[in-house]
Amino acid sequence: MIRVLVVDDHPVVRGGLVGWLDAQADLTVVGEAGDGLEALARVAELGPDVVLMDLRMPRMDGVTAIERLAAGHPAVRVLVLTTYDTDADIVRAVGAGATGYLLKDAPLPQLADAVRAAARGETVLAPPVAARLVSRMRAPAVEEPTARELEVLAGVARGLTNADIGRELFIGEATVKTHLLRVFAKLGVDDRTRAVMVAVERGLLPRPGA
Amino acid sequence: MIRVLVVDDHPVVRGGLVGWLDAQADLTVVGEAGDGLEALARVAELGPDVVLMDLRMPRMDGVTAIERLAAGHPAVRVLVLTTYDTDADIVRAVGAGATGYLLKDAPLPQLADAVRAAARGETVLAPPVAARLVSRMRAPAVEEPTARELEVLAGVARGLTNADIGRELFIGEATVKTHLLRVFAKLGVDDRTRAVMVAVERGLLPRPGA
DNA sequence: TCCGCCGTCCACCGATCGGTGGAGGGCGGA
DNA sequence: TCCGCCCTCCACCGATCGGTGGACGGCGGA
């Protein structure tokens, strides 16, 4: 019997998952959690085999929870189940130690199968997710902006001028422009507005609406 | 017995809703749909009392489906159930004729109650949604950008220069600047990048990631 | 009818930005 | 050790942008 913990902040989704999974002969849902912090507590308390985890949650997000789990409970398999297939989310989750990455538009039987596969230690990726990972590997030429560069770009997203950003980060305006030019090159763009759009698209900057 | 149709593109969510609602003595789920088009067909076929509808769906989105339902099946009550509480989504949905607007992080019992209230013809709004509607009414000073102005702003979001936008819309660059200045004023902003961010935040422009 | 909003356009200014082509220092891995 | 990456900074240019203060015609509601 595979012991499953369901983590999602939407009661509706939790209900759907619990109902379906529990109806499987070889699966049993031992608990639920509504955010990352709760998830950590439940794992310590219940010792599940597989954790089905959403990424965007209040208090503590999924990636952070996965990192903590990988550090504290390396035997637990974490299966990400989310709506979005942003490049950055995928890379972060897999990097943090997720055993698999599924999308919420997947049919229910696939979900149950994925949980079984995860319990066996197999890596399970939804086709679109796998495609993104592969294409990312195939195109290593696409350079990632540095942390500092993103910090500057975040200023741009807030509508600051280069001089403003410089003051805020305690660097010269010239440096701000250098960072920005490099970001433009890396994002394949040549103006600040588009740069912000592309960065948001790739999950490099937080989406404006929360 | 209240007859309910569940419309959502995520099988997990549909499963959760169907399971919970069907377990209520006075509710029965008569059908499901995965997008707006399917929803229209099911309504015509099944004649439900209440439709529980997601907004973001493939093929035909929820708002469009609501408009069609209001035109063709005015007796059917439509209850919006979505993850997001964007101003624009709310206004569009309510304007299109939705009887209520709920969020997916609502507890399940509330959902069932909302369906019952909707069946009685009552308007049901999740508290955050109600708050947004009220604050929007209280602040009519916040002017909405014109369709044309948004068209110009969309060009900006794509990284075009004012001259580019002018060529694309067959208007002079001066006109583009005039539109933009007015948009800035309406959005309470004074540069193009911020304007795009705020517009996305308010749902006036499509989110970059789909 | 007339008022008000919308869309279109103009000239002109200073501020800001995009871009070039440098330079130096620090830090970590090969 | 040395190479490469990252961060920092500079001067200078033309292009673009933000902002002012106008103007005119059209169209729909009061």
Image (cartoon, coloured by chain):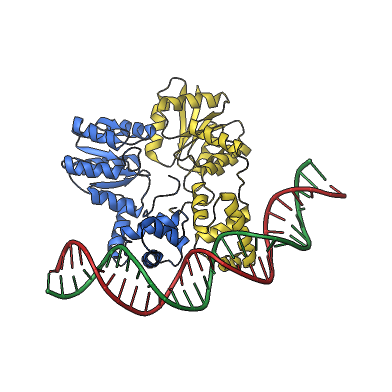
Chain colours: A blue, B yellow, C red, D green
Residue A15 placement: quadrant: top left
Residue A199 coordinates in the image, percent (x, y): 40, 57
Residue B27 coordinates in the image, percent (x, y): 46, 24
- Number of numbered labels in the structure image: 0
Q: Left or right: D16 with respect to A140?
A: right
Residue B64 visible? yes
Residue A26 visible? no
Residue B75 placement: quadrant: top right
Q: Residue at x 52, y 51 (%)?
A: B199
Q: Residue at x 31, y 39 (%)?
A: A60
Give the answer, above or below, for where B74 lies relative to B27.
below
* Front position in the image: B167 or A28: B167
* Front position in the image: B18 or C22: C22
* Front position in the image: D28 or A123: D28
Residue A181 coordinates in the image, percent (x, y): 39, 67
Q: Left or right: A46 with respect to D14?
A: left
Give the answer, above or below, for where B64 lies relative to B119.
below
Residue A8 coordinates in the image, percent (x, y): 33, 36
Residue B8 placement: quadrant: top left
